Amino acid sequence: MSVYPNPTTDFLKLKVESEKFESLQYQLIDLQGKVIHSYPQKQELINISFLQKGIYFIQLIGKENTIVRKFVKE
């Protein structure tokens, strides 16, 4: 999974290149591990304008695998 631009201000673009993640769920997670927001379906553009500046994680949950990527909100 690619997450860009990083750092970003308003939107996060996601690119998933695996068939293992056909049914997906995304979660935005803060540094304390708290889930801030969940997206129940595949997204390519995620609005993060509501987040405060800081470091966050986006977690992609598939049927068999989970991928986590770090990003910075400016």
Image: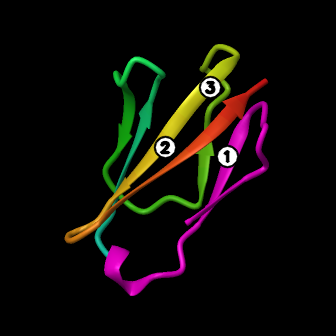
Viewer-proximal residue among 17 and 50: 17
Q: Which residues are magenta?
A: 1-21
Residue at 76% from the left image edge and 44% from the top image edge: 6
Name the residue tied to disc 2: 58
Distance CA(mark 1)–CA(mark 2)? 10 Å
Of callouts 1 and 2, which one flags the residue occurring earlier in the amino acid sequence?
1
The residue at the far left in this view is: 63
> In the structure shown, which secondary structural element does the residue marked by tag 3 occupy?
strand
Inspect the image, locate mark 2, and give the three-letter code of the amino acid beneath it: Ile
Q: Which of the pair 30/26 is nearer the observer?
A: 30
| Mark-to-mark CA distance, 1 and 3 | 13 Å
What's under tag 1, amino acid-wise? Leu
Give yes or no for contact between labels 1 and 2 (Cβ–Cβ under 8 Å): yes
Left or right: 64, with 33 as reference point: left
- Residue at (70%, 32%) from the top-left corner? 72
- On residue 12, which mark appears? 1
Q: Amino acid at mark 3?
A: Ile
Screen quadrant of the N terminus: bottom right
Q: Position of residue 41 (x, y in %)?
A: 36, 58
Q: Which residue is mark 3?
A: 55
On the image, the x and y values in percent for residue 67 come to 41, 58
Q: Residue at point 31% right, 51% down?
A: 40
Q: Which image quadrant is residue 15 in?
A: bottom right
Is residue 62 inside the magenta stretch? no
Mark 1 vs mark 2: give the one in front.
2
* Foreground label between 1 and 3: 3
Q: Dot 2: few (<14), some (14–19), or many (≥20) neighbours within 10 Å?
A: many
Judged from the image, the secondary structure of the residue bearing numbered disc 2 is strand
Task: Based on the picture, tell me whether residue 7 belongs to the magenta stretch.
Answer: yes
